[in-house]
Image: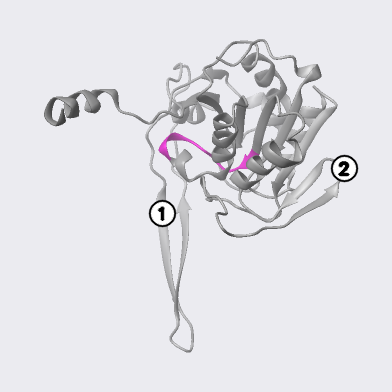
Amino acid sequence: MFDAPLDLKNARILVTNDDGVETPGIELLEKIARGFSDDVWVVAPRWDNTGAGHSISFHTPFQVEEIAPRHFAVHGTPTDCVLLACKELLADKKPTLLLSGVNPGPNLAENVTYSGTISAAFEGTLLGVPSIAFSVHGTSPYCWEAPARFTADIIRKAVSVPWPKDVLINVNFPNVPAAEITGIFATRQGRSKLEQRITREEDADGKVTYRMDWILPNFSRNVGVVPETDIEAIGNNAVSVCPLNLDFTDKTLIENLKRVLD
């Protein structure tokens, strides 16, 4: 278990994301972190790494720029950023807490596997650092009012209770003003596969390229029903706080396999 309650005032907080070191979401999250502690570090990709997942720059040298005191732009992936921060830049004292985001776009259901935002928190958890990821559902323009209003309180409450060392917390906000938030709920991971859209393009020389993007599902609202899953919460204009376990093992199938393999 991670120790609880976590002393935020004396915490060393690492802030990262997958969208880039100079984006509105990470600036908001850093501001919130600085409301807790003076020991805040920002280590994030130099450029957008949306969809990078848990990729790492094996055998590929990358550069790091110190763009301001305790602010580092990494020419690599979100996972690179967390590894570099914990093993090199902050090697004298490991972060007490990792905050990833705030991501413009949802990280819900099984689609968390694509997410650089979630993977940064995943890597922090693997390194023994309590980690929380934050995202806003929807598409541009994004409303940052709800994350600005509720994120600090979610962090305080999350670190006030013990959680297993192989668990990260995934927070998703609906893309609505704070006044329209219907609640903040602990949820489980839902099922809602993003629809990928592939566009084929051919230039004058006959060279074919493909472009991939996705279509966000339109979650219908079910006002008044307490949401059980992250997607139900978003569909109800509520904030989802979903603990994700790093152990992907299916307990039922492993028992069935033991019977036929052992």
Say if 198 sits above or below 133 in the image.
below
Which residue is at the front of the view, 45 or 174? 45
Q: Which residues are magenta?
A: 102-110
Distance Cα–Cα, label 1 vs label 2: 40 Å
Magenta highlight on residue 108: yes
Quarter-of-image position of residue 261: top left
Indicate the position of residue 167 as horizontal and vertical percent values.
51, 24
Residue type marked 2: Pro
Magenta highlight on residue 156: no
> Residue reaching furthest bottom?
205
Residue 262 in sight here: yes
Indicate the position of residue 130 as horizontal and vertical percent values.
61, 24
Q: Nearer the viewer, mark 1 or mark 2?
A: 2
Is the residue marked by circle 2 packed among few (<14), some (14-19), or many (20+) residues within 10 Å? few
Residue 238 in sight here: no
Residue pointed to by mark 1: 196
- Relative to residue 72, is residue 243 drawn left or right? left
Q: Secondary structure at mark 1?
A: strand
- Where the C terminus falls, by quadrant? top left
Indicate the position of residue 51 as horizontal and vertical percent values.
52, 50
Q: How is the image coloured?
A: one colour
Which residue is at the front of the view, 146 or 93? 93
Residue pointed to by mark 2: 69
Say if 199 sits above or below 74 in the image.
below
- Relative to residue 244, is residue 81 drawn left or right? right
Tag 2 or tag 1, which sits nearer the N-term?
2
Quarter-of-image position of residue 254: top left
